[in-house]
Image (tube, rainbow, N blue to C red):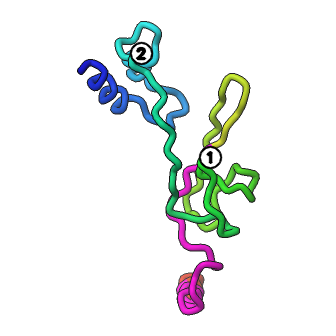
Amino acid sequence: EEAQSCQAACDAVCMPFAAVPSQECVQTCLALDSPCLKFAVCRPVEQPSFPYECDDGARPLPSGCCAELSARQCPSHCVQQDLYQLRGNRSVHYECDCQSCRLPESLLSPADLAQLKAELEQWSHF
């Protein structure tokens, strides 16, 4: 019961993409004298899935980044592109947060591509 309570508490106060853990997260879950540190475990790794494809049509790496772009970038067709640098003891790892991604032109049907180009043309006059 205490372990489940700690898991819920740590899930609530420790944000997975935070550059620096919050003070509450450290006090509750990460500090050597925190009440929940004894329950800290690495969760099983699930292969993440992403609602976008890379510019070359390939699936993103588990980091969310595209391999053909030095594994440090989102696809060009994503409006929001955030890169996070995660430092380990001896390495640096990058993760991408790619949002508002549309289908790349190579995956659009000719009719959808024509419609998209017409809409872009219409907006370019403003």
59 to 107, vertically: above or below: above
Give the structural element (helix, strand or loop) at label 1.
Answer: strand
Q: Classify residue 55 by image quadrant.
A: bottom right
**How dense is the environment of label 1, judged by Cα within 10 Å: few (below 14), some, or many (20 and up)?**
some
Q: Badge 1 is on which residue?
A: 83
Q: Quadrant of residue 108?
A: bottom right
- Is any part of residue 126 visible from this angle? no
**Residue type highlighted by circle 1:** Leu
> Left or right: where does residue 99 sit relative to residue 75?
left
- The label nearer to you, 2 versus 1, is 2
Q: CA distance from mark 2 to mark 1?
A: 29 Å
Horizontal and vertical percent for residue 45? 51, 39
The percent coordinates of residue 10 (x first, y second) are 36, 27
Mark nearer the N terminus (2 vs 1): 2
Rendering coords of residue 106 (x, y %): 65, 79
In the rendered view, would you say 29 is above or below 33?
below
Left or right: 51 in relation to 72: left
In the picture as drawn, the residue positioned furthest to the left comes out as 1
Residue 83 belongs to magenta span: no
- The boundaries of the magenta stretch are 95-119
Residue beneath the point at 28% across and 26% down: 4
Specify the label residue 126 is tagged with. none
Residue pictured at 50% horizontal, 62% vertical:
51
Q: Residues within 10 Å of mark 2 (few under 14, many from 20)?
A: some
Residue at the (40%, 14%) spot, across then down: 38
Judged left or right of residue 43, residue 28 is left
Q: Position of residue 68 (x, y in %)?
A: 74, 59
Tell me the amino acid under the disc marked 2.
Leu
Given residues 33 and 116, the one toward you in this image is 33
Residue in the image at 66% along x and 30% along y: 87
Residue annotated with mark 2: 37
- For the C terminus, which image quadrant? bottom right
